[in-house]
Amino acid sequence: MTASCIIRPPADALACSNCTAWSQWDHITVGQDGPGGFRVIGRKPTGQCRANPPSINSDAIGSETAMWPVVGSEDWCRQFERRDQREVAA
Ligand code: SF4
């Protein structure tokens, strides 16, 4: 695996990245300790959960006032609703 490898749950997994409420946001770097020290092995996507209306950040400037919870691709909750695999995540 290289540092640019994207690590995602399987398409059939109970996971936020397979949910209709998932909205792709960013990535987190994933690594592991080894004999040569810490080594980056890839990146995991993070997304916004849009299952509920956003909260409002009154300190934000411009159009960035809406805030949704940020979740990892492998997270899940009881509101999980499987996205059609032919559908592209937002
Ligand atoms: S937290 Fe729940 S509703 Fe939100 S994206 Fe994840 S599984 Fe879906």
Image (cartoon, grey):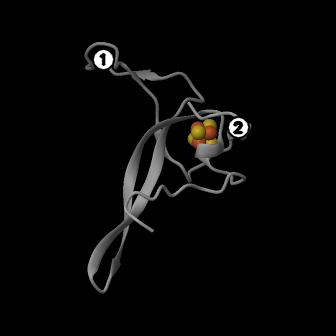
Mark seen at residue 75? none
* Count of labels in the image: 2
Q: Where is 53 relative to 39, above or below?
A: above
Categorize mark 1 by other alpha carbons within 10 Å: few (<14), some (14-19), many (20+).
Answer: few
63 to 87, vertically: above or below: above
How far across and how far down the image is residue 53, in percent? 54, 21
Residue in the image at 26% along x and 79% along y: 37
In-image side of 48 versus 34 (left or right): right
Q: Secondary structure at mark 1?
A: loop
89 sits to left or right of 79: left
Element under label 2? loop
* 21 sits to left or right of 70: right
Question: Residue at image x 60%, y 56%?
Answer: 9
Mark 1, residue position = 58
Most extreme residue toward the top is 62
Q: Quadrant of ligand 1?
A: top right
Residue 38 position within the rendered picture, expressed as x and y whole percent measured from the top left: 29, 74
1 or 58, which lies in front? 1
Which label's residue is closer to the chain start, 2 or 1? Answer: 1
Q: Position of residue 52 (x, y in %)?
A: 57, 26
Q: In which quadrant of the rendered view does residue 29 lie?
A: bottom left
- Which image quarter holds the C terminus? top right
Question: Mark 2 — residue?
Answer: 83
Question: Which quadrant does the N terminus fall into?
Answer: bottom left
- Using the image as rendered, state which of residue 87 and residue 54 is in the foreground: 87
Instruction: Give the amino acid type for the residue marked by disc 1 in the picture.
Output: Ser
